Each structure stands twice: as structure tokens, then as C-alpha cells.
Amino acid sequence: MATESDLVNEINPVDFIHLLEYLEYSRIKVKDAMKDFHAGGKLVHHRFGDRIDATGFSLFLKNYLEVDDFPADLSQRLYWYFQRSERSGPDTSPHCKDGGVSLKAVLCYFSILEDGNPRDKLEYTFKLYDKDDNGLLDSKEVDKIVTQMMQAAEYLGWDVTELKPVLQDMLKAIDVDSSGTVTHREWIQGGLNNIPLLVLLGLKVAEKDGQHVWRMKNFNRPTYCFVCQKMMLGLRKQGLSCNFCKYTVHSSCANKNHTPCVRTFVRSKTEIGRHSDCVPLGSSHCDCERLQRHILPPWAICAMDQADSISGSSLGENYMLNINSDGHVLQIFPVTDTHPLLVFVNPKSGGKQGKRVLRKFQYLLNPRQVYSLDNGGPNPGLQLFQNLHKYRILVCGGDGTVGWVLDAIDKADMVIRAPVAVLPLGTGNDLARCLHWGGGYEGSDLTEILQQIEESTLVLMDRWSLRVIQADVEDEGDPVPNDIINNYFSIGVDASIAHQFHVMREKDPQKFNSRARNKLWYFQLATSETVSASCRNLKECLSIECCGVPVDLSRLSLEGVAVLNIPSMHGGSNLWGETKSVEKLNKWQEVTVDPDALEMCSQDMNDKLLEVVGLESVVEMGQIYTGLKSKAHRLGQAAHVTIRTCKTLPMQIDGEPWMQPPCTIHITHKNQANMLMAPAKTLGCFLK
């Protein structure tokens, strides 16, 4: 039997929650991280046969979870867990001779945490709690579960004053035959139907129509349970609330019979569904009040037999067929005089803002209109809406998220390319500023945002292709992050700062989870760059051509060069500057490099022209940002830009940096995207 000191070294539910939090920030899949142990991989010397040693396991966790300071004690407990889970019999201590751990076991475990269903994760937790490996949870192990669950609940911020009896009753209910022990089958079957347990372990059941999507919530005003009608008491998270319909219950009432969640579609043409706000009105049809033009009502989406979907074309042009994630084949009926909103949310943008925005839109709109980009990216939503003729898209995230959705629209070859609005959740949000959506969402009422979308105007935005040809294919550099420019491309001082920030964030992403904190990091790195001046004499390392015409750099001392598509960079700096209307050239010209003529060239995001500017230093960047200087050095305006470099330099596309060996760069026009510009009375283009 393992000693008490051994049990201290076992992983527990708090560790489980920690792992899920680390996985939430990581962008690497375990199958890709495992390649480091294959021939030629950087961790292959830690592998022997199909096993890896403790050092290799620790390095794997740091690489896989993208964090350099992963807790050593948690790494050790995980290592011992894998060793113990492989052995038969309860009498083996984790401190026995180190024989490594199975690569297959590690791969399976983290694959379950990444993509596993609740049944698989409950399987894991049973093994976690079954300390003596006898296939039963006895009374002592059940008591241990209650204690550890209390610790996990406290870590998550639950109000635990009345939680212990709730947990005891919950586990008692799982013991169906009242034998005093919980079998493996009882744990799995009972766990799948036990809402507080699933929520506490962070497990999500499939989101089926009419099923609540629960989360723990802190209620800062008097709130009553919908089941027992009693007030939610406590100082912290006192109960469960549904993301879709705000149905609220005590943890102890969650497993009791309750009203189903709002419907998101109907199962026949004769069946009527209504939006939750309209149910009290008693109307058979839902006008959704002020959100009517944005909502895809439940009665506009109908399930049909899969056999019928094969011959869907016979239904006529007014019907759109889609297979939903829970297996339903959906038939969408267009609603006259509406422009339903397709919402994409990056839950990792803006710290925790993304998750809050996701929940709010799931409540305000039909949840089938709102997609987390964590779940399959933009494609599921685009497929659902692909044949709808009148709809709009709202992207909630940073500029990179907007680019992701625009790329997906290109690759999907959409017949109808819906216009895109932006709710800025990133750090720079330069595109959102130019489209008048502001420099960052500050938590205002989302119905106001929807009203602004209703009043917005359609504008076109140029998009540019970037092709990088390395001078020596054997030179090692970072992969180019993207081949499309929406906002800007730059080389030199600002890209150096962005690259340093990127490296730091890759090492420890949890330290970069708020817009304010990210700006402080940028300020610190910019100050350091001012002293080091790592990109001085940049003009000696590159040459620029605008439509084949060389740009004269001899008169300038530059540390940076930027190629602009929009009038905002660095979180609100207009590097090209304003051009007085009386000076603007009326005739479109493919290329302008003459300094005097450039002073009369204005900038427009849909003129199929790029602007090229030079930056003297970090200090100049700060002066332009604060308004002490009106613009950077105008170098050229052209429909095609070529840049040649002769040394490794920092570069960035739309805020995504990399180190690039000597190369030739060609930037050419790709296409134009349909965007929505907010009414001018909103936050403004260059809000800092």
C-alpha cells in the first residue's frame, strides 16, 4: 500500500485543472510535439525503445505546453502517475527504480485531454481516484474524492460553504446499488448524468438542442434558483448558469428535472420555435424585437431526413442544406428583411474577454450563429451560411483573427462574400481602428455593437500577396507566418520589438493575457531597443523597388521600413500621415517615388496601391504615436513592391514576426475583401 507521503506526490483534481488551463493556451498538438522523440528530433536522446526518461518527459511538457517554467513538482507527479498506471498491483511505490514512461501512454493521455469526450475523461479520473487499482472506489477513496473536489472547487472560486454535503449526495447517487462502493460502470454512467461533477472537472457534454450549457457563476445581485425557488447564497460562485438561456440553479438542484434550454431549430416545417426573449409574449412567430435583423430565428432552421438531403437541389434555390455537429441535417429558410449575423469569437483574445463575449452572443443570438474559433476554426460557420444571400460576419478578436477569417473565406471560395465587421479584442487592433470600431472592446453593451453593425457601411479593403525567395535555400530562418498582407509589412526596428515580444510570449503565454499588460511589455522592449539600436544602418542591408523603379535611400538614416495597406500601425500610429484635400492627386498612378509628388499622395485601403515609409528610430515611432510628429518618411506609393535584403533581418506581417535570412520579397495585389465600417460617431479610427 502506498504511504501517505507517496499520496502527496499523486496528481489531484487541481493538477487536472492546471493542465487544462495550460492546454487552453497551447497551440501545439501532442502528436506534433511527439515528433521531437523521433529520429532527428531534438529529444531523441531521451528515448530508449518505446519509452522516455524523466528529463525527456519534462522537456516534452515545456515544448508541448509552450511554457518554460512548467512547475517541476507537477511534472514529477505526472511522471510518477504514468509509471504507476502501467504497473499491476497496489504495492508499487512511485519511487522505485526509474524505467521511464511509455510514449504511447503519454500520447493517449494528452490526446484525451485535447479532444477526448467526457466518457474518456471520466475513465481517466476513475483511474486517478482508484488508488489501490482494484476497480472499485471504496468509502475511503470516496472520502478522498470529496476532499480533493473541495480543494478543486475552492481553486476555481466556488462558494464551498455548503458544497461538501452536495458532493457527498452526488457520489451517493452514483452508487446505484447502494453497496458502499462505486464500480467503474457506476462512475462512468453516473458521471455522464451528473452536472456538477462534469462542470467541476471542466468536462463538456455534446451541445445538443434543448440541452443547457452550464458554467459556475458568481451572482452579485439577488438571484433565485429556477428549480427550488430559493435564493442563491454565498460570497463566491454560488450556482450554475446556462450560457444560452441564463437558466440558474443551485449545484444541489442541477440534477433535478428542469425546463429544457432554448430551441435553436425545429424538427419539422409545422413546428414553431421562438427566441427566448419572445416566449413570454405568447406570439407564435418571433420578431426578436430590436435584434430582429441580426438573429437567425429557430423557426428558420429545420431538421430533415438525411436521405432527403442527397437530393437537396430539388428543394429549390430558397433552401440551404447543412449537417450540424450533433448529426442533424439542417434546412435553412431565408428570412425576409433580415441580415443574420455570423459571429466568430477567438476565446483566447483579450485575456478572458473572448470567453465572456462568446457567452454573451450565445445568449443574445441563436447559438447556432455563434462559433468559437477553438472548435474547428471558421469553416463550420461558413459552411452553415454558405448559400445565404444576405448575412453579415462579425469577427471578435485581434487583427490576426480577422486575417484568419478572411483567408478562410478565400479558401472556401464563397459564392456570397459577406461583409465583415470587427469587435477588437487584440492588442494593436489597427484594422479595427481604421474601420472605426475602436482600439479595443471595453465591455460595453453588445446590443450597442449590434446597432452599430446595423448602421455600418460597406467598404472594400485591398489584400496583398507576399512571396519570399531566399537567396540561399540552405539558410536557416523562421517560417514565414503568412503569405497575405491585410494591414502592413515591415522590416527593422519595429519588427525586432515584435519578435522579442513574440519569443517572450511563446515561452510563457500566461503572462501575456491582457491588453494593458501587453502594452507594458512592448514599452519595456521599445526602451531596450532605443539603447541597443540593433537595426541601425538598415539602408546598407536592403534595396527597394516600386514597380521596378529604385527608391533612393541615400539621404536618410533608417532603422525600419514599412509597407502599408491601411492608415494605422503600432496600435494607432498613422505613419503615412494626412494629406490635405487640396493637395491630393486626382489621377491614379501606378508608381510615385518623387519626394515632392509623394507629399500630394493620399492613402486609401481600396486604391490598389501600397505606401512605403522609412523609420529613423524607436524615438520617431513614439513621436508619431503621441502626435509630436505628423508622419514618417514617405518613400514611395506603388501597385507592386520588391525588397531585396543581404543579411538576416527581423520582419513582420500584420504583427506576426520572424527572422528572415537574405531574400527577395515581392508584394503584389491579391483581391479585395468586403468590410463594414462603423458609423463615424463611434470610437474613432485612432483611439489609443
Image (tube, grey):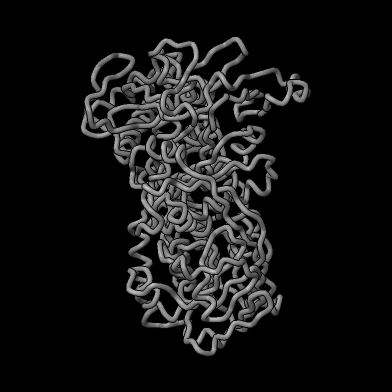
Which of the 4 image quadrants contains residue 217?
Answer: top left
Residue depicted at x 38% and y 67%: 522
* Front-most of residues 560 and 679: 679
Q: Is residue 225 above or below residue 600?
A: above
Q: Is residue 330 visible?
A: yes
Residue depicted at x 45% and y 58%: 430
How many marks the image carries: the answer is 0
The percent position of residue 140, horizontal first and vertical second, equals: 36, 29
Which of the 4 image quadrants contains residue 616?
Answer: bottom left
In which quadrant will I find the C terminus? bottom left
Left or right of 155? Residue 24 is: right
Residue depicted at x 49% and y 27%: 366
In which quadrant will I find the N terminus? top left
The percent position of residue 149, horizontal first and vertical second, equals: 35, 34
Identity of the residue furthest to the front in this view: 582
* Front-most of residues 15 and 377: 377
Residue depicted at x 40% and y 49%: 680
The percent position of residue 280, horizontal first and vertical second, equals: 38, 13
